[in-house]
Image (cartoon, rainbow, N blue to C red):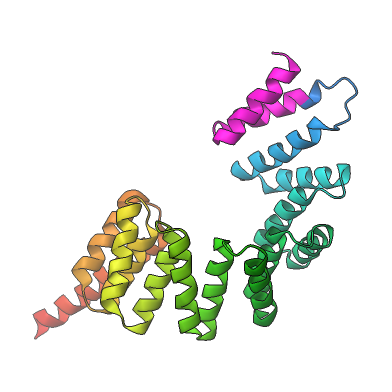
Amino acid sequence: MKQESKYYTAQTLYKKGQYPSEVKYTIEQYLKERVNGIPVGIDAKLIFILAKVNLRLKDEKEAEKLFKICIKLDKNDIRAMLELGKLYVKQGKEAEAEKLFQEYMSLDPNNIHARLELGKLYAKQGKETEAEKLFKEVIELAPKDLPSRLELGRLYVKQGKEAEAEKLFKEYMVLDPKNLHARLELGKLYAKQGKDAEAEKLFQEYMTIDPNNVHARLELAIFYKIRGKKEKSKQLLIECLQINPNDEFAIDQLNKIQAEEETENYISDIE
């Protein structure tokens, strides 16, 4: 296979999200066959793809190394900065992540991506004022941006600003009527407020839109358990485990319900 063919094969498979191991092998072979052995131009793009593929393959160490190579090749490579920053957040290297997001923002002041990620980092660190400011800036720069509304809404729920959170989640759903994230967050908010019918409706809608997703089932299972509807809760937890047998939270909740039932039956037999 010619070098150019290898490049396009790897790029096509990557875009389709297919065969990450094959993409990794193809790109690595392509780079090895370079005459001068120095990655430049099109090779830098391949190294970025290779780093992303390594993330899919759960090789964070190799991905980190490759993102750093991208930045070394081009100190203004904002895509690599963003991805490396997100990886650092995941690894708990928050100071390094913050530095990269700040560098990204200095290179491209009107770009929303680093601003959003830095806001999420600040929210995680409890820097709520700074996080709120960044989320609002993203919405000002990109009025139809959805993730910023979701993150700001979550922050408002945490701060007890429930009316503001509800407004943002509803705006999100207007912009994207079938979106699951805002529907889930609004359902959780309604459950917290005791608006049971509204919460249950949203969780059921989520399950209708995405039948094989466990998140709404887990939330609805907790909702039913708190309200004493243990059989409904158990059924949903069993469905979760049919979808994902290794879901630790579902296993834990189901075990707790079963333990409670065994205790209740034991007490009933004694009486």
What residue sits 25% from the left and 79% below the top?
227
Is 128 placed left or right of 239 in the picture? right
- Looking at the image, can residue 151 be seen? yes
| Residue drawn at (32%, 83%) of the image | 194
Q: Give the range drawn in magenta.
A: 1-30
Question: Could you tell me what secondary structure mostly forms the magenta stretch?
Answer: helix
| Residue 154 placement, left or right of 193 | right
Reply above or below: 155 against 49.
below
Instruction: Give percent across and percent down for residue 186.
Output: 41, 72
Q: Which residue is drawn at 25% across and 67% down?
A: 233
In terms of image quadrants, where is residue 100? bottom right
Left or right of 271, for residue 89: right
Q: How many marks?
A: 0
> Residue 160, percent across and down?
50, 86
> In the rendered structure, does residue 18 fall within the stretch colored magenta?
yes
Q: Residue 6: where, in percent of width, then height?
A: 69, 21
Instruction: Identify which residue is drawn at 37% across, 51% down.
Output: 244
| Residue in the foreground of this view, choosing between 126 and 255 | 126
Q: In which quarter of the image is the C terminus?
A: bottom left
Q: Nearer the viewer, residue 92 or 13?
A: 13
Percent from the top left, x then y, of residue 25?
A: 67, 27
Q: Can residue 255 be seen in this view?
A: no
